[in-house]
Image (cartoon, helix red, strand yellow):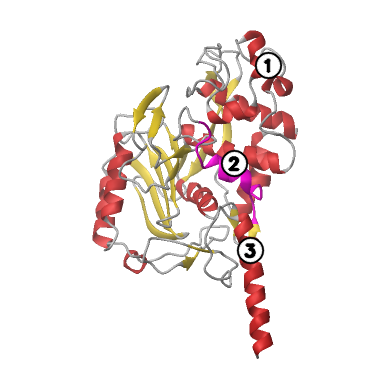
Amino acid sequence: MHSTFKSMRALCQDISMRIATLSLGYLLTACSGSSGSPEVPVDAGRQPLALYFPPPGNSWETVEPSAAGWDPVRLNEILDFVGQRASRAFVVLWNGRLMAERYWQADATYVRDIASAQKSVVAVIAGLARQRELVTLEDKVTDRLGAGWSNAGQAEARIDLRHLLTQTSGLDDLLNLEAEPGTKWRYTNHAYHQVRRMLESAAGRGIEAMSYEWLWTPIGVTSARWYARPGMADPKGKALWGLTISARDMARFGLLIQAGGLWKDRPVVSDTPYLEAALKPSQALNPSYGYLWWLNGQGSHVLPPSRPRTGPLLPSAPLDLVAALGKDDQKIYVSRSLGLVVTRLGAAAAPTADALSDFDDELWARLQAARSP
């Protein structure tokens, strides 16, 4: 009996160690559940619950708000508020389970272009390319795309993949050099779009094929589609691409991030050092920016295109919040401390910029108030 207990304890420790190396420093309090899902901390004082990973298709486990420690009345008021802000789709997951979901003149099949929220998806695909040893962060853009991809002249040869992922290329919106690479943070879509081209060159295939083989299929996403935006090109005439996807499939992607790159017992993103770096300040110029991810809880932030401000990105949100933010309030929020993934699709919810609007802070103030004492 004693030896059996020791064997079980050793097995438990071994499984926990393996999961810990594949998650972003989660404190595992026990072994995986029967589904192979890691236990993760949720709200302080709440009972930890193994993450649930929905199977492919429309089946999705739900949880009652009150059972998860949330006020159902206030949560319903949040849904009303979101609907009043030109939203079409809104999903809230708690530890992977559907806690709230609503659609306005739409249903769960609704998709739209998520604008710059796609950047965070591409950041993960870049990590998947790196773990396959197809790229490094030090790869020069010119080595992948050839000379003349920008209007920076010979200086473009000093720009690498890391500069593009951190928005520190030194290029402006016309792809002209305005600062030495790595010395200025500037949010520029035209420089960012070279990441996709670099990845396609390195992998020898298009972004759609890469996405489905490496990312979408392993986590059950079926609605995502990349497309060349009609009439939109960078200053060198290269097409700018969009990504359409549903709110539920955005939530699947957010759940992958919450789980530290795991999906059930499978490490989809096994390059955990890369994922850790992507979700931390990537440079001192804008500490609220990782690798194409927005980060809360920092002492200052810079909003597009280059507007510095003091204080955290979202004062009302959890300090550990990370977010994929797109124009007209396309949102993927992830907070491990609360066990939440929140997604939103629709028209502009407030006067908006390329990233934040007033909608973000008001939404999170309401969500924080909906947590039961």
Horizontal relation, residue 316 to residue 111: left or right = left
Classify 116 as above or below 17. above
Viewer-side residue, 84 vs 40? 40
Q: Amino acid at mark 1?
A: Ala
Horizontal relation, residue 315 to residue 117: left or right = left
Q: CA distance from mark 1 to mark 2?
A: 24 Å
* Residue receiving disc 1: 157
**Picture quadrant where residue 123 is located:** top right
* Residue receiving disc 3: 17
Q: Position of residue 351 (x, y in %)?
A: 29, 29
* Mark 3 touches mark 1? (CB < 8 Å): no
Q: Position of residue 287 (x, y in %)?
A: 45, 34
* Mark 1 touches mark 2? (CB < 8 Å): no
Dot 3 crowding, Cα within 10 Å, few <14, some 14–19, many 20+: few
Lower sequence index among marks 3 and 1: 3
Asked whether residue 289 is drawn in magenta, I would say no
Q: Is residue 86 in sight in this rendering?
A: no
Mark whose residue sits in front, 3 or 1: 3
Q: Position of residue 260 (x, y in %)?
A: 56, 52
Q: Please tell me the numbered disc located at residue 124.
A: 2
